[in-house]
Amino acid sequence: MRYLFVIMILFVCINTQAQEYFATPEFRKFWQNLDHLKSLESDDAINYKGSPYIYESEKASLSLSNNEQIKGLTLRYNIYNDRMEIKKDQQFYNVPREAFIKSILLDGYLFKLIIYRSGNKKKTTYCEVLVEDSLCSLYLKHKIILKQAEDPKPYQDAKPPEFKKVNPLLYISIHQKPAVLVASKNDFIDLMPNHKEEIAGYIKKNKVKFKKPDSVRQLVEYYNSL
């Protein structure tokens, strides 16, 4: 049993070294510099109800800009703060929004840092990839709000601050341009450069609901097939 334990430790060490050796110089620098960043763990954390995280995975992977994959990482997505967090030596650190990281796979869900339009400005955010195509891509933006704590009232105990999930947002990118928020049938049709009549007919026939991501995903796949 002791020998099996030793072999397992050696395998983990060798695997970690292999990750650092075969990764790009950018990733090696990123991994080594994590120790110099401030840990996200805090001893004086507030007692929140709920969680700002989804899809924490010990089998997460990063896809780099050169298409190399770094596997066997522990990552989680902090929806409320819109940041990816990576674990090293029992501590979580913020993943800087570096260009060499192409995408992140969490528990089977693919995430990318996308550019989107907010009024006249361009911003970035992490989104789950539902459809990715050179013609039309669809991204899901998870949303969480923080309800403030409530003081005790007559016949009611005090309530701690609470993280609550709300309806996600959907973003559409045409021809790989900055994504645009889509919340209704008219939003979608107005974005389409072609096949507006076919799209309107499909939406009506299939009763597409823009509050249901899977329904919109099928619509985007149909558009890409035209």
Image (cartoon, rainbow, N blue to C red):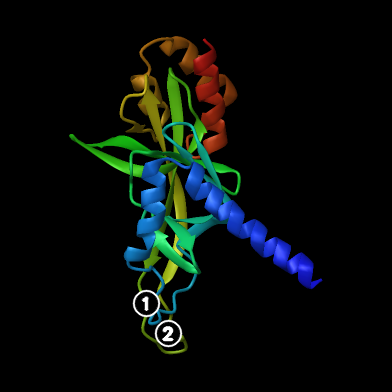
Residue indicated by mark 2: 158
Element class at badge 2:
loop
The residue positioned 54% from the left and 22% from the top of the image is: 221
Instruction: Of the two numbered discs 2 and 1 on the same chain, state the one appearing first in sequence.
Output: 1
Q: Is residue 64 visible?
A: yes
Task: Tell me whether the residue at label 2 lies in contact with that at label 1, contact meaning CB atoms closer than 8 angstroms.
Answer: yes
The residue positioned 33% from the left and 51% from the top of the image is: 96
The circle on residue 32 is: none
Q: Amino acid at mark 2?
A: Ala
Element class at badge 1:
loop
Q: Name the residue nearer the viewer: 177 or 150.
A: 177
- Give the percent coordinates (x, y) of residue 3: 78, 68
Residue ranking furthest to the bottom: 154
CA separation in Å, label 2 and label 1: 8 Å
- Side (left or right) of 176 relative to 19: left
Crowd rating for badge 2 (residues with CA inside 10 Å; few <14, some 14–19, many 20+): few
Residue ranking furthest to the right: 1
The residue positioned 46% from the left and 57% from the top of the image is: 86
Q: Does 67 appear above or below 44?
A: above
- Give the percent coordinates (x, y) of residue 14: 60, 54
- Side (left or right) of 60 relative to 189: right
Residue indicated by mark 1: 149
Q: Amino acid at mark 1?
A: Ala
Q: Does 88 appear above or below 107?
A: below
